[in-house]
Image: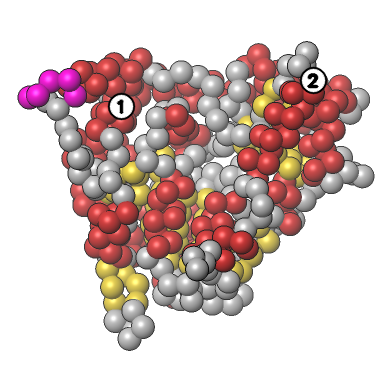
Amino acid sequence: MALVNENFLRLENDYLFSNITNKKNEYEKNNPDKKVINLGIGDVSLPLASKVIEAMNKATLEMSEKETFKGYGIVQGYSFLINRILDVEYKKRGVDLEEDEVFIASGTKGDLAGIADLLSIDNKVALMDPVYPAYRDVNIMMGRTNIVYLNATEENGFTPELPKEHVDIIYLCSPNNPTGTVLTRKQLEAWVKYAKENNAIILYDSVYEVFIEDESIPHSIYEIEGAKDVAIEFRSYSKLAGFTGVRCSFTVVPKSLKIFDSKGEQVELNSLYRRRQSTKFGAAPYITQRAAEAVYTEEGQKEIKENIKYYKENAKYIKNEFEKVGFTVYGGINSPYIWLKIPKGMNSWEFFEKLLNEAAVVGTPGVGFGKCGEGFFRLTAFSSKEDTKEAVDRIIKLFK
């Protein structure tokens, strides 16, 4: 008799964003005359940079010639991309990494799950609340039950204090999804210090670092002294270069990062992750990696910066317009996410339903990210300028 992995039965029936999509689709089915504007899911709307398309086309043609055809790829990733990452993403910020510390993959969700594979289910995990659902779900799927939630509230600026109890794994995200807030250098130094003192590791999601404008805010946790001994960093091209449909990411696992076996002996996580990837991951496609390489050309950098500027302007517009009419708004600066405080007398899902049914606008209920998200609502800046302005106008009219 085949038995189910009952850890999956502990998950909520629907993933948050699938649930939202289903509600949107149902509304559209029943209201075919209404134009629905989706500011709920963080999908991009601008096309890929021309330099990226050029690189993909060239790589595709290479696959048609015997001399340049590529079969199975390198599990860790091709050197041509990794070296560009090291030069542009890290060396310019004073961070020295080695080529075999960077792993190319096909999306941060998969990378998060891959690292979770390496860590004992007996570890105590610290998640901020509100939290990006994938962090919670990958741990539940692994069978972890010892999860501590650190309350990130309006009162503490959505940045909780260090854990009062010992934890082994800490998930941090800056710029944060969903709150749009950022961790300062001083705050990151405190987390790194805690991790060192408690033999803990930090899983640091930095996929939105390209939106940081404040020069005092670190773009990488490795800008903090000692972080390479305790932190793994996740990056993605989804928002950086609009690769939501292309799929490419990378994870940094420093060789100086050690964890422990049951006998108390140190184990190098880098070599374990390479072994894991060799078994469970085939390699990111050659064409995709050539596309990512093109992001780092002079022309590619210019084009993607224009796209990021476009989304930043959307974020600032949403923030400013809501603040003008009295809403309390967080995020929208250094981040593509706007964390909107809901008017009194409504909860997050009621606000969602009101916006969908009366304004044909989709957002994300804050409670979907955890109990501390109740009373808030996440909007994204990734739609077109025209749709963004129309959505904001529709919402404001509901509450005049």
Most common SS among magenta residues: loop
Question: At 33% across and 60% down in the image, what residue appears?
Answer: 228
Q: Which amino acid does the dot numbered 2 rest on?
A: Asn
290 is higher (above) or lower (below) than 76: above
Residue 371 pos. (x, y %): 74, 57
Residue 162 pos. (x, y %): 58, 67
The mark that comes first in sequence, 1 or 2, is: 2
Q: Which mark is residue 31?
A: 2
Question: At 30% across and 27% down in the image, what residue appears?
Answer: 291
- Report crowding for label 1: few under 14, some 14 to 19, many 20 or more residues within 10 A (C-alpha): many
Residue 64 drawn in magenta: yes
| Residue toward you, 195 or 355 | 355
| Residue toward you, 243 or 160 | 243
Q: Is residue 91 visible?
A: no
Quadrant of the image occupied by residue 345: top right
Left or right position of 386 against 215: right
Span of residues in magenta: 63-67
Residue 53 pos. (x, y %): 33, 18
Residue 355 pos. (x, y %): 81, 30
Question: At 24% across and 36% down in the image, what residue appears?
Answer: 81
Q: Is residue 118 visible?
A: yes
Question: At 61% across and 28% down in the image, what residue appears?
Answer: 381
- In the picture of the structure, the residue carrying the numbered disc 1 is 291
180 is higher (above) or lower (below) than 6: above
266 is higher (above) or lower (below) than 339: below
264 is higher (above) or lower (below) than 315: below
- Report crowding for label 2: few under 14, some 14 to 19, many 20 or more residues within 10 A (C-alpha): few
Quadrant of the image occupied by residue 360: top right
